[in-house]
Image: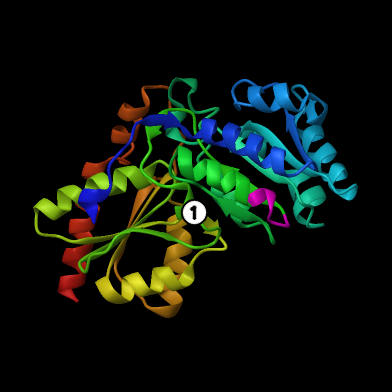
Amino acid sequence: MLSDIQSTGNKDTRSGFGDGILEAARENKNIIALTADLAGSMKLQGFIKEFPERFIQCGIAEANMMSVAAGLTIGGKIPFTTTFANFSTGRVYDQIRQSIAYSGKNVKICASHAGLTLGEDGATHQILEDIGMMKMLPGMTVIVPADYNQTKAATKAIANFEGPVYLRFGRPAWPIFTKEEDFILGKAHILNQGNDVSIFACGHLVWIAVEAAKILATKGINADVINIHTIKPIDKEAILNSIQKTGCAVSAEEHNILGGLGDSIAQIASREFPVPMEFIGTNDTFGESGKPAELLVKYGLDAAHIVAAAEKVISRKNKN
């Protein structure tokens, strides 16, 4: 029920990663943390204090970090690479493709400061293409958790998962509203059930989708709200069950609408059960410097835009 979804406070998702890797490392001696001169930003202080011998500072040499990580897997280690999402993907795509994805190396690529909510750092750091880049790599698992608890749970889960993973999270303090046990890799997290419209979201946009659903409820519109934290492999069954019930869908993501979550859902719908669909995300554009909340509004990633998209897609459905 929507009324049961309440924030218990705000905390950045990158702290969920930092706490998650520390707990995972206590259980598995093979976990190694690597960073490209961003240990503090990636919240690795606890890990470094407790396991200094399992920490590798690669310096501002992200491509080399990926190559080192690939090599570590040959000896049975489980390397977690850490830097900003822009540097985790765009700067090192060749190394990821050739040395990690192609050979199926057990590297966990952990990427913070993704999307518009990075804020004042501006377009050069606000990568909005990374989900698409990483999901197109054969064998790459892609995870975009919604809050601190889910990021912590995802970090621990990928430590026990064999294969390359891209884990994307963010910088700002964000509402905490999930439980760690809600995260099951590859399985969608259903937050609310409704019959009028399906709203699929990932990352920071999940909370905003919840807010939008609450507004829609005051208008007599009941929304399915589904947290697609695992973009690949995506939960096809959950998506089809929802759109077969509601007959229309809205996707919401802090990413370009070209190549992201919405594209994955649209592929499933077009092949299995075509429905009217609207897409919330940036529209073939770079970001800019600004306050995170203001940027979300300017680029159409706030609750009001999700509400408008839901109303539009319902209207389209009713015309068919």
Q: Is residue 124 visible?
A: yes
In the rendered image, the quadrant that contains the C terminus is bottom left
The residue that appears at 9% across and 59% down in the rendered structure is: 220
Query: At 16% across and 73% down in the image, what residue appears?
Result: 319
- Residue 95 x, y percent position in the rendering: 78, 43
Is 183 inside the magenta-drawn segment? no
- Tell me the amino acid under the disc marked 1: Phe
Dividing the picture into quadrants, the one containing residue 80 is: top right
Residue positioned 20% across, 66% down in the render: 196
Horizontally, residue 88 falls left or right of residue 126, namely right
Q: Which residue is mark 1?
A: 183
Render colour scheme: rainbow
Residue 59 in the image: state x and y as whole percent: 77, 22
The picture places residue 164, in percent across and down from the top left corner, at 71, 52
Magenta-colored span: 158-163
Does residue 50 appear to the left or right of 9 in the view shown? right
